[in-house]
Amino acid sequence: MDNWQELEHKYYMQTFYRAPITIVKGQGAKVWDDKGKEYLDFVAGWAVNSLGHCHPAVVKAVSEQAGTLIQTSNNFYTIPQLKLAKLLVDNSVLDRIFFCNSGTEATEGAVKLARRYGKLKLKGAYEVITATGSFHGRTLAMVSASGQSKYQEPYTPLPTGFINVEYNNPQAIQAAITDKTCAVMLEPIQGESGVNVPDKGYLKAVRQICDEAGILLILDEIQTGIGRTGKLFAYEYSGIEPDIITLAKGLAAGVPIGAFMAKESASVFAKGEHGSTFGGNPLACAAGYAAMKFILDNHISENAGSMGRYLAEGLEKLKTKHSLIQGCRGCGLLMALDFKTNIAKEIVESCLEEGLLLNAVKPNALRFMPPLNITQADIDAALAKLDSVLTRHESCGV
């Protein structure tokens, strides 16, 4: 059993577009394949490995917890869950938290909470307004919530209750609100559809619209939360306070976990109205607490902000050198580089050969989401590899 890719073709459901390497080891911002080749990882488990691979604080916490208590049920109190809950509430504007296992479970839970709020306080309102280009997860309901037809068309008819309107357009939200609306759910920055950054006043305008209508504002911070944008939560840039937020990805630095948090006024679940067997288990929460404590104590969000600016400056320099680049955008260490033509996939494949892992987030755009504790040296190395690839493609007339 040494040809792992053949085994995948034979046994695994063919749902992923995989790069042709088998990763067997990771440390910091680097990974190694089964042939011993080294790569700089600027995908970071899809913005999950917030502290890089196998960070000592997380490894220590997981190792100790695995030898102590891995799983009970939420029928009992467990210490790691409550330590992480307190840490997140104390460092946010939210009051209550529920832990689950993934981002899509977090958004599902947030929508359930909003619907429960609608039933109790808004005469049964149940519809949630979301934005075109959004991505909220892979369950049927969250596919329906996501404003991307490519994810929806294979599964029609979809669950009802979601209204998609234009992103970065507060007036479109205003026009879509009816007496059936219980909430608006938005990403502060749309990651999966190309790192789309809205206008500065967008979230503030939406917050005002929600307040005037008496409905909830849910912010999906699955990708932008836990320091990714240079602040612990992306809502901090807008000067507003959401009613509910969702978290996952970087929360436990590689260990599967999700969460949704709510203001006390929106926390309307009664006992027995929501639950999870594995959600908030001691192992995941121990990893989450260790990661969050390290991020907070060592100002990792600030590092993401400064290194994000450094990366953006480097990408702008590449733009002046390479005519095939259209521009770059993003916030913190969630960045995109646009090309004038649809060459992103080719560039990603060439970067793979060069020892750099990137994501083609659109046919004409690369996405950069390295660990939040990335160094200038690693960014310089990544930019040098990308520069070499772009030079080679230009010389070939691409």
Image (spheres, rainbow, N blue to C red):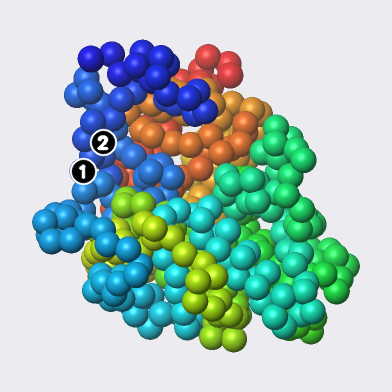
**Where's residue 128, x and y in %?**
73, 64
Asked if residue 238 lies left or right of residue 225, the reply is right
Q: Quadrant of the C terminus?
A: top right
**Which of the two residues, 220 or 65, is positioned nearer the viewer here?**
65
**Which of the two residues, 156 or 243, is positioned nearer the viewer here?**
156
Q: Relative to 384, say whether 267 is above or below.
A: below
Which type of secondary structure does the marked residue at label 1 adopt?
A: strand
Residue at image point 72% right, 59% down: 130
Q: Amino acid at mark 1?
A: Gln
Q: Which residue is mark 2?
A: 31
Q: Relative to 386, say whether 128 is above or below.
A: below
Mark 1 → mark 2, Cα distance in angstroms: 6 Å
Which type of secondary structure does the marked residue at label 2 adopt?
A: strand
Residue at image point 68% right, 69% down: 115
> Residues at badges 1 and 2 in contact (C-beta under 8 Å)?
yes
Q: Which residue is mark 1?
A: 27
Q: Relative to 72, say whether 239 is above or below.
A: below
**Where's residue 95, x and y in %?**
47, 83
Residue 197, by quadrant, is: bottom right
Asked if residue 165 lies left or right of residue 155, the reply is right
Q: Within 10 Å of the Cα at label 2, are there few (<14), some (14-19), or many (20+) other Cα atoms? A: many
**Where's residue 230, x and y in %?**
44, 65
Asked if residue 349 lies left or right of residue 22, the reply is right
Residue at image point 11% right, 56% down: 67
Q: Amino acid at mark 2?
A: Val
